Each structure stands twice: as C-alpha cells, then as structure tokens.
Amino acid sequence: MLAFQLSVPLWLEHWMSVMDTTEHSVAYYLVIYAVIILAYIAIDVWLTYVCNVIACLRASVILHENVLARVLRLPMAFFDVTPQGRILNRFSSDIGDIDEVVPESFICLLTCLVNFIGTLMILIFATPAFAFVLPVIGLIYMIIQKYYIRTSSNLRRLDSVTKSPLYQHFSETLNGLSSIRAMNIKDRFIDENAVRTNKSATASYASWMINRWLNVRLEALTSVSIFCAALLAVLSKGTISPSMAGLALSSTTSLAYNVIWTLRSYCDLCSDLISVERVHEYSNKRTEAPASTGVHLPKNWPQQGRIVFKNYSTRYREGLDLVLKDVSFVVQPSEKVGIVGRTGAGKSSLTLALFRIVEAADSYWARASAQESDSTVDGEFDLSTDLGDGGAIEIDGVDISTLGLKDLRQHLSIIPQDPTLFAGTVRENLDPLNELSDAELWQALDRAHLKPHIASLSGGLSFEVSQNGENFSVGQRSLICLARALLRKTKILVLDEATAAVDVETDELIQKTIRTEFKDRTILTIAHRIKTVMDSDKILVLDKGRVEEFESPKKLMKSKGLFYSLAHQAGEV
C-alpha cells in the first residue's frame, strides 16, 4: 500500500505531462490524491482494529479458555507422564506468542502483501514485458519458501520442545532448594541447568540462522529481478518514455524489498502458528468422564453408605499392569473399615477407584480417556453402553461408573494424607461455595480442636492463608481438612493415611474427633499406624492388589494371618 501511495505522484506527473496543465486539472488530481490517502488511512485503521481488537484478541481468549478448561479436566494419568514444564510452556510461552507475536506477524504480512501487489501493478504497467519473466521468478520464490517453511516449522517446534525441560528443571530446583543446599549439591543443579539452557539456546540459534539463509537467497533473486527489469527497459527504449523507464527501475527496487518482506512475513507467520498448533493440541485431548451424565439419583443419595466392590480391577493408565485385581468385598452402612497392607499393596489405589481418579480396567471411560482425539461430550449417558469387564463399585445400589464425576464426588468426603490448603481466607478453605454461616464454621473448628488457634489469628475466619498453607503447621492443616470434612456432612468418609505426617498428639485428637463426630458415617481408613484401626469394625488386608483378609480385628488376630504379622511387626502384639 505504501508503494502504491508513493507511486501516485509519478502517475500524475506522467499523465499531466500529456494533458493541459491548467489550474482546474491540478486541483482535480490533488483531490483524487487526497481521497486515496484518506481511503488508505481509513482502511489501515479498520484493518488494524479488526486484526488486533476483534480477531486476534478474541482468538487468543477462546484458545486460552479452551486449553485451560480442557487441562483442568484431563485424567490424572496425563499429569503422571507429562512434565510440568511442558504444560507451563503452553500457558506461558505459547500463549504469549498468540497474544503478541501472531497478531503482529499477521498485520505485517497483510501490509507487505498489499505493498507487493501495488508495486507489481506499477511495474507491469511501466514494462508490460516483465509479466513474462514474473512466473519464472515467482516459481523460484515458491520453491525456496516451501523448503524454508518446512525446515523453519520443525526448528520452531524443536525450540519450543527444548524450553519445557528447562522450565521443568528450574521449577524442580526452586521446590527442592532447601534439600539442595542441605546436601551441598548446588553445583550439580547449576551444571544441569547450563546443559539444558545450551540445548534451548542452540535450537533458538538454529531457528534464527534459518532466517539468514532465506535472506541470502531472496537477495540473490532480487538482484536477478532488477537485472531483468533494467534489461527490458533498455530493450524497449523506443516504446517507453524515459520517465516510465525510471518508474520501472525504481519499482523493481521496491518490488524486491516487498517480495523479501512478504515471503519472510509469511514464513514467520507459519512458524508463529506453531504456538497455536501446540495449544490446540492440548485443547483436543481426551478428558476424564463428564461432570454429569443425566443419570437420576435418589434424593439425599447415599442415604445408607453401603459400598460394594464386585470383582473390581484397575490400572493407572492403559498399557500398565493391574494395581487392583478382582477386588470384592462389602462395607455395610455406618461401618468402620480399616485398610492395611504393605507398601504397594493397593491401599491408595482403592481410594482413587472410589473417587474415580482411576477407572475400572478396560471400562468405557478408561478407553475413552486413553485416546488422543476430541473429548467425550457431556450429556445423557446411555445405560446400554458397554462398561467393560473391569468389575464395578456400587454405593447404595448405584453403579458409580454410570454417574458424572461431579455427581459422585460431591457426595463423598476425604481427608488426604497430604493436607491441602489454597491461597485465600480460612473461610474460603472451609466453605469454598460460601454456603454456610460463621456459626457453623466456628462449630466445625471447635469440634476439630482448632477454634482457639483460629480465634487468636488476626481476622479470625478472614485470616489470609498463604500458598499451600505454609503459614500453618502440617498438623494444623490436617485439622482444617478435618473441619472441612465435618462441614460436608456426607455419608461416606475416606481417610487416606490422614495422620501419617502429624505428631502423636494431633493424631489422637483426629482419631477422637473421628470416633465421636463420624459415628453415623461409613468410614474407610487407610492405616499408617496399625494402632489407629484396631478399633475398626472390620479390617481389609490387601496384598499385591488382591484382598487377602476381610474380618473383624479380633478374628484376624486369632487366625494369625497376614494382619497378625503386620501387627506383630508394628509392635501391637
């Protein structure tokens, strides 16, 4: 467009040299020139607004919202095999390129393309014979551009891939900084960071050098184009005027410049769109089961809290061995069951299965989440769907595999082994949905033996919890999680080694509260200390993913089986 704008005075000079240069003619052409300039400004402003404010901003927001919503609903198996740095790279570097680099590259390409077309029209108008040379030069340009795009895109992907391990390693270093200093191995991490930085820098350098490669070849073709235009102007000296010959040579110089920047802008845009491709890849990954399947649940389900495992088997992801194998047992309403076993016996896997963090082996949802194409669409669940042969888990007669994850998980409570708090107030951690009154929150804290401490803090329930709850001790975080479970009032409670990381006194407080406050609930307790489950109604003993024993503690002690040996090793016998 700039070349077209600058060429207007040359056109006017040529035509006015032929026509009578009266004041009326001069004014007439100046008006035309002014109209063209104003039209150019209007189009430029409109295109800039459309590209930046409407198209690019809207596309960036949609892409970010899609990938964020999808990543938050991906199955846990994805996070087990995907480095954290690779995920952060999508939300930092790639989203940053979509926000800033891609719109700029698109506008640059559009501007260069308009300038190229305008200059080409002028050149063909000045020397029509150049139209016969143009296809040959254009074909060479296309060959170079095609080769460059293929190489540049792969180098751009390599550049993005090498950044992820660098981010991952740096994040791990910051998280383990205290251990690194304590063990005096900082030099090892510095050297590893240098190695990964060099790999990333090498990929970036190669990506930049390919631009220089393109520039050399385009400059060479530019020189050929100028030579051809000059030769045609000399050969046509009897048919074109000197002014038109000068216009042709100056346009050839501008054409060479515009061709270089048009091709480079196009190639840069193709490389920058790799970021869109990477973000779009995560936006199309299969999620876990939908939040709701449309299955109607009885009112106040579960009312009894009866849990039935029927030949249940599961694995953490497709291709791995089973971690639970044909597990079958029945937990009666309001029964307290302790789950014990050696490390790797499948205790935590049982909890994950109940919350459907992992699905039944070879089930419909396990197969669906293992695929890489578009996710399962939320909607009505077809009860005739083949659910696979990995067994089933029923709560009050309802097969949980037919439920949406939100419908299932909101009716279960858990106090995890690693107590988790989020940045925000104490109130937000206890009641994230803001459904309860202050009196109910204080009552829950009192029952969890934490009311005096929270009352002594500035602001009380409005006290700000730092990230990961670092301004609370591990025991205090466990008690807050206990208070959170008290407020949920669900019929089923899972204790996943909830007292594993707390002192003996806090352990006794938690156990006392559980015995008194949860006596009408069904409780599954994964035992860290055998002592904590000795008063349970039944003990479930797991070994290598199978149920070995399931009886009351007294009977198991008399039988002197696996549970007896575990209790003996713990000093309880």
Image (cartoon, helix red, strand yellow):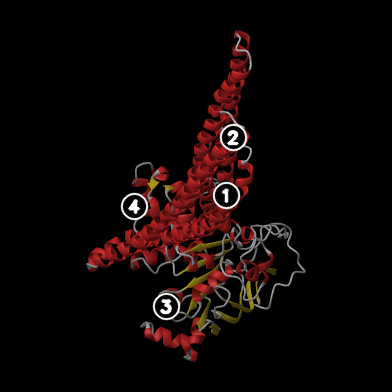
Above or below, 432 relative to 334: above
Among the two numbered marks 3 and 2 on one chain, the one whose residue lies closer to the N terminus: 2
Q: Are marks 4 and 2 in contact (CB under 8 Å)?
A: no
- Considering every residue shown, the one lying at the far front of the view is 238
Q: Residue, x 37% and y 82% (percent of image)?
A: 570
Amino acid at pointer 3: Ile
Q: CA distance from mark 3 to mark 1?
A: 82 Å
Q: Which residue is mark 1?
A: 137
Q: Residue, x 76% and y 64% (percent of image)?
A: 382
Q: Residue, x 51% and y 35% (percent of image)?
A: 249
> Element type at marker 3?
helix
Above or below, 512 relative to 104: below
> Element type at marker 1?
helix
Q: Which residue is mark 3?
A: 530
Among the two numbered marks 3 and 1 on one chain, the one whose residue lies closer to the N terminus: 1
> Label 1: few (<14), some or many (≥20) within 10 Å?
some
Q: CA distance from mark 1 to mark 4?
A: 69 Å
Quadrant of the image for the N terminus?
top right
Q: Residue, x 61% and y 62% (percent of image)?
A: 286
Amino acid at pointer 1: Ile
Among the two numbered marks 4 and 2 on one chain, the one whose residue lies closer to the N terminus: 2
Q: Which residue is mark 2?
A: 118
Q: Nearer the viewer, residue 157 or 124?
A: 124
Q: CA distance from mark 3 to mark 2?
A: 84 Å
Among the two numbered marks 3 and 4 on one chain, the one whose residue lies closer to the N terminus: 4
Q: Nearer the viewer, residue 29 or 376?
A: 29
> Element type at marker 4?
loop
